[in-house]
Amino acid sequence: MSNMLNHSDTKLRSLKLNRRNSAVIAVMLFALAAVALPAAAETTNPATVEWLNDGDNDGLQLVTFFLFFVGYISMGAAFVFFMSERSNVAKEYRTTMTISALIVGIAAFHYYYMRGVYVDHQVVSIEYRYMDWIITVPLMALKFPSLVGKDAITDAKFAGLGFTGICFTGALIMIGFGYVGEAGLMNGYLALILGGVGWAMIMVATGLPFGLYDGLGVDNSKIKDELKWSTDALRTFILVGWIIYPLGYLFSPEVDIIDIGDKGELWMGIAYNIADMINKIGFGIVAWMGAKKATEALNA
């Protein structure tokens, strides 16, 4: 009886400490944001950007401008959230929360610079975009095994590569061919097809949602019940959410698949910005939901 009481007291103290740590981290990060935002607001006020207010502006420039700003702020807010929640999940899921925070934190940094390039040079930068993707997409693939646990990852190999190798190689293929296509270094159609091979490799490793295909590297029977919904949600993001990116690619001026003149670059930027916010933040949210649910089951 005394052991049970001691165990309950320990858990209660741990929960209180986690909440206190979360509050401290959140306050510190929001305080930093409060200091930075006034300066950021001055440079993101569309009224101060003359070319956004000329007679030739049909609204797409303004939408692109605000999506860069919204992307920067939303990614930063997600970083604050994931970091503050890291101590509120069990130890085995803290790596997942760290990866989630890294993804949106890195994206927020790049969005800040992409916004600056757009304001100063009226260009939707693909260089900063792909610098972000070459880091964050492999991290998104790494988040999957960190959530389901090493026991659920099989030893199956494809072309000598295990689960992590397939996902990382697929991510590099997808991003690499996307860049050479958008940089005009390869035929746009061919680059799109070869980049799709990388996406397919990730799907082969992780599987399809709702039991359609378990995945070469995943044993669904070893995934905790509390994590199965989140696991399927992550697979759905990869299967459906990532389709927005090739849609944006089609409008890229150098790719020359859908040619609508100067507006192509803007539609590309809008599609990419929306896709990033949906996938990077959504990916982290569903992983957090699974981690919280599994943590509650452990503490029950």
Image (cartoon, grey):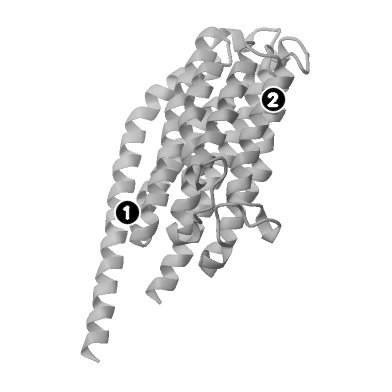
Crowding around mark 1 (Cα neighbors within 10 Å: few <14, some 14 to 19, many 20+) is many
Asked whether residue 201 appears in the rendered view, the answer is yes
Q: Which amino acid does label 2 sit on?
A: Leu
Return the x and y of residue 34 as percentages of the image width and height: 35, 34
Q: Residue at x 47, y 47 (%)?
A: 143
Q: Is mark 1 on a helix, strand or loop?
A: helix
Return the x and y of residue 212 as percentages of the image width and height: 71, 57
N-terminal label among 2 and 1: 1
Residue in the foreground of this view, choosing between 205 and 100: 205
Q: Residue at x 38, y 22 (%)?
A: 39
Crowding around mark 2 (Cα neighbors within 10 Å: few <14, some 14 to 19, many 20+) is many
Say if mark 2 contacts mark 1, CB within 8 Å. Answer: no
Furthest-front residue in view?
160
Q: Residue at x 58, y 47 (%)?
A: 205
Where does label 1 land, which residue?
Answer: 22
Q: What element carries label 2?
A: helix
Asked whether residue 63 appears in the rendered view, the answer is no
- Say which quadrant the N terminus sits in: bottom left
Q: Which residue is drawn at 68% across and 59% down?
A: 210
Q: Which amino acid does label 1 sit on?
A: Ser
**Residue 13 in the figure: left or right of residue 83:** left
Return the x and y of residue 18 as percentages of the image width and height: 30, 60
In this view, 277 is above or below 187 = below
In this view, 44 is above or below 164 = above
Where does label 2 land, which residue?
Answer: 192
Return the x and y of residue 192 as percentages of the image width and height: 69, 25
- Say which quadrant the C terminus sits in: bottom left
Residue in the foreground of this view, choosing between 278 and 67: 278
Nearer to us of marks 2 and 1 is 2
In this view, 266 is above or below 293 = above
